[in-house]
Structures are given as C-alpha cells and as structure tokens.
Image (spheres, rainbow, N blue to C red):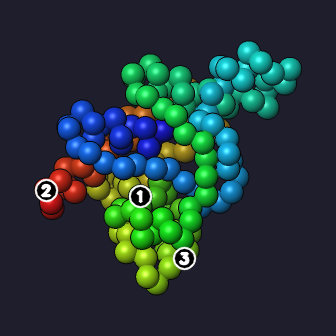
Amino acid sequence: MGEAVLRHEATKRGIDIEVDSAGTGAYHVGEDPDDRYTNFQQSRFPILTIRHCRTISTCKKHNIPIDHSARQVKDADFSKFQYILAADESNLRNLMAKKPREGTATVRLWGSYLANKPISDPYYGDIRGFEQCFEDCTKLSNAFLDEVVSKN
C-alpha cells in the first residue's frame, strides 16, 4: 500500500518519482497485494485467504492504482534508490544490517518524516487497520515529499 500511495501523492504534485516496495524477509515473495475479497470468493478455505483483499480494496476505495508483486530487498537497491523507507523499527534494523558499505541510499524510518512513529501493520486486523494504514501512508508520503522536494 505504501508504494502505491507514495506514487499517487507524488503524481498529484507533478513529481516524477520511481517507487518500489520490497520486504526484508522473503515471506510473500511473488504474491500480489492483499486482495481478500477476490480470494474469499475463489477459495474453499476463506479463513486462510481472507487477508488478501484489504490492501487492494482500500486503495480502490481511494482511487489509488495498485499493481505490485512482493519481492525481497536486494543489495543493488541500496545503490539504485536514493531513499529506502522502513515501515517500522524491526525493518529499519534489518535494512541497516543488510546495507552494503558501498550503498548510497538514505535508509530511514518512514515515520521519521512526521511523528517518528512506525506505520501500524494492518495484516492481522480488520478493514479499519487498513484504513488507518492508508491514512498514515498518505500523511507520511506528503511529509516525505515535502522534505525531499525542499532539499532539491
């Protein structure tokens, strides 16, 4: 969701930006964004797949285009991207440990651009958690863009 929201907020401002999303672990590599409704309709075991529609449905509700398959952070990302934003302290620690010496990316907690708080993980909750995550991503995207644009 964060990738889609950041890209959308940048586009609204007329900012040309490359945004990608990757995890520090390989938990969901190759999976599409959380699409619970679709999987619920297609699955015999909806309890196992109910988590798969809320990211997409939340983005669609707010007219945010989303199209992404999960991947894991690569060493090359630390040179390819100028900024790498961590959703929480655990991911920030993992990113800092993984960052190669020659990596040039600024690695920060995404929340450090506003209230210095992590983005709450909606994964195990209900739709309200996804709405809160969307609101957080929107605020943090704008705070990040405000700071980055003012520097350049």
Q: Position of residue 121 (x, y in %)?
A: 55, 44
Residue at image location 67% in from the left, 20% down from the top: 38
In the image, 79 versus 97, the foreground residue is 79
Q: Is residue 48 left or right of residue 66?
A: right
Residue at image location 40% in from the left, 27% down from the top: 64
Which of pointers 1 and 3 lies earlier in the amino acid sequence? 1
- Kind of residue sitting beneath label 3: Ala
Q: Residue 85 — which label?
A: 1
Residue at image location 60% in from the left, 42% down from the top: 69
| CA distance separating discs 2 and 1 | 18 Å
Q: Is 122 located above or below residue 107 in the figure? A: above
Q: Can the viewer see residue 120 in this picture? A: yes
Q: Is residue 134 left or right of residue 24?
A: left
Residue corresponding to mark 3: 97
Residue at image location 39% in from the left, 62% down from the top: 81
| CA distance separating discs 1 and 3 | 14 Å
View extreme (bottom): residue: 101
